[in-house]
Image: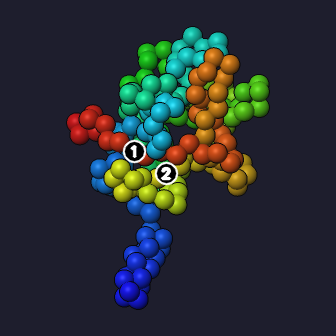
Amino acid sequence: MKTTLFALFLFFFALVSAKPAFVDTDGNNIINGGYYYILPVVWGPGGGVDIASTSNETCPLSVVQTSSELFNGSPIRISSPHKIAELETNYILDLTVVAPPSCADTPATLTVVSEDDATAKVKLAGYGNAVSGWFKVQALNGFWMKKGVWIYKIEFCPTVGNSCGDVGISYDDKGNRLLAISHNNPFMVVFGKAESSAE
């Protein structure tokens, strides 16, 4: 009995002390410059990350979680200025929509803007009131039970100041699930490899 308990202790200690890997839903390392779907850990309220027109936008510039859990959203290119083949958590990242609409600026890199309601929202580059900074991905304590891979959150770190904010979900008056900066309610995600990343 003591031997079994000791073995279980060592197993859970190894899980807690292991460095979080930055991997996709198949357990493969995230490739620098690869294309991925940003997917929710909890399915039901919505699906993957996509872009949409919100408020008075005439072009889909808002980054949202899709309302349908059957939709993976748009492929996102995940890249870092670090000259490495595989990414790790806590690296500075660029997140870019692979196939943006023709009305959007290119490259369609995700950014954060400060709007009239004082809520900083995730938009496509070229939007007014952009906040200078960068994105990071951090692992959360816990595993995604379907595949045994890490659960992640996305952070935005402004250039001015040293306080990074979690990317969470904010609802507008039309029920859109907007990606916005939250300091206490991160959008928990995993990363599914998009077919185009193999091209």
Q: Which residue is mark 2?
A: 152
Residue 55 coordinates in the image, percent (x, y): 65, 16
- Residue 81 in the figure: left or right of residue 4: right
Residue placed furthest toward the front: 1
Q: Is residue 139 visible?
A: yes
Q: Quadrant of the N terminus?
A: bottom left
Q: Is residue 96 visible?
A: no
Q: Quadrant of residue 122?
A: top right
Q: Earlier in the sequence, mark 1 or mark 2?
A: 2
Residue located at (61% from left, 21% from top): 175
* Crowd class of label 1 (few under 14; some 14 to 19; many from 20; radius 10 Å): many
**Mark 1 belongs to which amino acid?**
Phe
Secondary element type, mark 2: strand
Residue located at (65% from left, 40% from top): 181
**Depicted 83 relative to depicted 120: above or below:** below
**Mark 2 belongs to which amino acid?**
Tyr
Residue located at (29% from left, 50% from top): 26
- Residue 12 in the figure: left or right of residue 138: left
Residue 130 coordinates in the image, percent (x, y): 65, 32
Residue 101 coordinates in the image, percent (x, y): 44, 18
Are the two marked residues, 1 and 2, in contact with CB atoms closer than 8 angstroms?
Answer: yes
Q: How is the image coloured?
A: rainbow
Alpha carbon of mark 1 to alpha carbon of mark 2: how far? 9 Å
Front-most of 185 and 137? 185
* Crowd class of label 2 (few under 14; some 14 to 19; many from 20; radius 10 Å): many
Q: Quadrant of the C terminus?
A: top left
Q: Which residue is mark 1?
A: 191
